[in-house]
Image: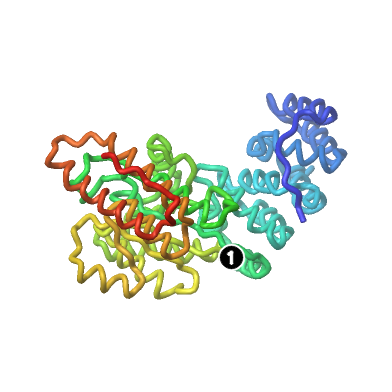
Amino acid sequence: MAIDTAPDASIPSVLPKLDEIRQRMASHTDRRDERRILEILAGASAVELDQLLLQIDLRALLGDVDDRLIGPDNRTALLDLLTADRLGDLGIPARAALASALQRGRTGRLDEQALRRIWLGTRGADVTRLKNALDGRGGYHDLHQLFYHDIDDDALREELLAHIAREAIAVSTREVKILSDIDDTFYANWKDARYPKKTVYPGVLQFYAELDRGPDLEPGRPGDLTFVTARPGDRLGLVEDATLKALAERGQRTATVLAGSFMRLLGNRAIAEKKLENFLEYRRLYPEYGFVFVGDSGQGDIHFGQRMLELAPEAVRAVLIHDVVATPEAARLELAVGGVRLFDTYIGAAREALELGLLGPEGAARVAEAALAAFAAVPFPSHEGRAPRRIEMLRDVARLKEVLPAPLRVETSL
């Protein structure tokens, strides 16, 4: 079992080795520099090697150390050293850093074989931790990008996915991966004219946080939010990175993004099918998890949620839809029978999640309190625009109070 470690420059023996490696990488790295770097890494203790990989710019290192037409094959030797000979000395953060560095730029056959050794050399709960560590590094180069874009060898991809499936059997988790749409789910940005454009919906940030925390007194591992969006991705990851930046600016600082495609941009059904394709791929990456989808009623998310429930009923714990098109009550009831629950506010969403066992009472109350506080700050242009939304908030608070234990209080001064 790999041991998690964090960078610790207090280990005295690491600093001289780190300084020398950085100096030899500072300008042109010739074969003598490469040989010396290999000697330092090979001679490092297990703790030293782990710490060195957490502090070296691994992407630059892999770019500086080369294989040559007439020897020596120093890059091959480096990858053999780190992913075969000494892989057992690397903790999960170091393995994640190395895998991330290998997926930057063109991922060639040598890199794919090194990735193969990393994944097949990681077992049980460590596989789950490695996957989450990769997704937790932030940015475009996440786990989904690695498996479904950077790795070109279909047979290798299937081998690694089979390994993930086998190792997931031994992992018991009650946690869920939260999949969320963005437009009209996270903020008003498409069909929803009830709120000022770009308004982050009151309570949505706390709702994500509470779903991530889970219903138990002991909070779950943070960082399980992924946005599944119709926005088309691109080869350079510019759309995903821009989306993550926009989300962070609005308060959601940790998440991953599964983007859509230009080919599936027209029509709600096409958008939903692309999201479904992404979900099915994502589920293969995280077979040990349940899934909750949070979407809206304006752009194919109901169809997407229904297809999720149809194809993976044992894995999908809930489909929660923010209603932005005033769906009639009879239609809501019919959808609920099929497992798709609609809500008007995130206080209402918290009540649904509480009934489904996805939140505890305290978590649901915290969502309500956060939603009320955020609603008070929304710059509605008129009283006429604000009044109906206030009525919705107060109604959903009253409904939530009906199912909360007596000691919990939610102040409703709007």
The colour style of the image is rainbow
Rendered location of residue 256, percent (x, y): 48, 48
Between residues 339 and 359, which one lies in front from this camera angle?
Answer: 359
Q: Measuring 70% from the left and 49% from the top, which residue is drawn there?
A: 92
Please tell me whether residue 68 is drawn above or below residue 296 in the rendered image: above
Residue occupying the far left of the picture:
384
Three-letter amino acid code at the position of disc 1: Glu
Please tell me whether residue 122 is drawn above or below residue 204 in the rendered image: below
Please tell me whether residue 212 is drawn above or below residue 138 in the rendered image: below
Rendered location of residue 161, percent (x, y): 60, 66
Rendered location of residue 248, percent (x, y): 43, 37
Q: Classify mark 1: helix, strand or loop.
A: loop
Q: Measuring 34% from the left and 52% from the top, which residue is drawn there?
A: 347
Residue count near mark 1 (Cα–Cα under 10 Å), binned few <14, some 14–19, many ≥20:
many
Residue 68 appears in the rendering: no
Rendered location of residue 291, percent (x, y): 47, 63
Quadrant of the frame with the C terminus: top left
State the image quarter where residue 273 is shown: bottom left
Q: Is residue 90 left or right of residue 62?
A: right
Between residues 353 and 291, which one lies in front from this camera angle?
Answer: 353
Quadrant of the frame with the N terminus: bottom right
Mark 1 = which residue? 288
State the image quarter where residue 277 is shown: bottom left
Q: Is residue 191 left or right of residue 356?
A: left
For the image, the number of numbered tags is: 1
Between residues 384 and 294, which one lies in front from this camera angle?
Answer: 384
Residue 218 appears in the rendering: yes
Q: Measuring 56% from the left and 46% from the top, which residue is drawn there?
A: 136
Q: Is residue 258 left or right of residue 102?
A: left
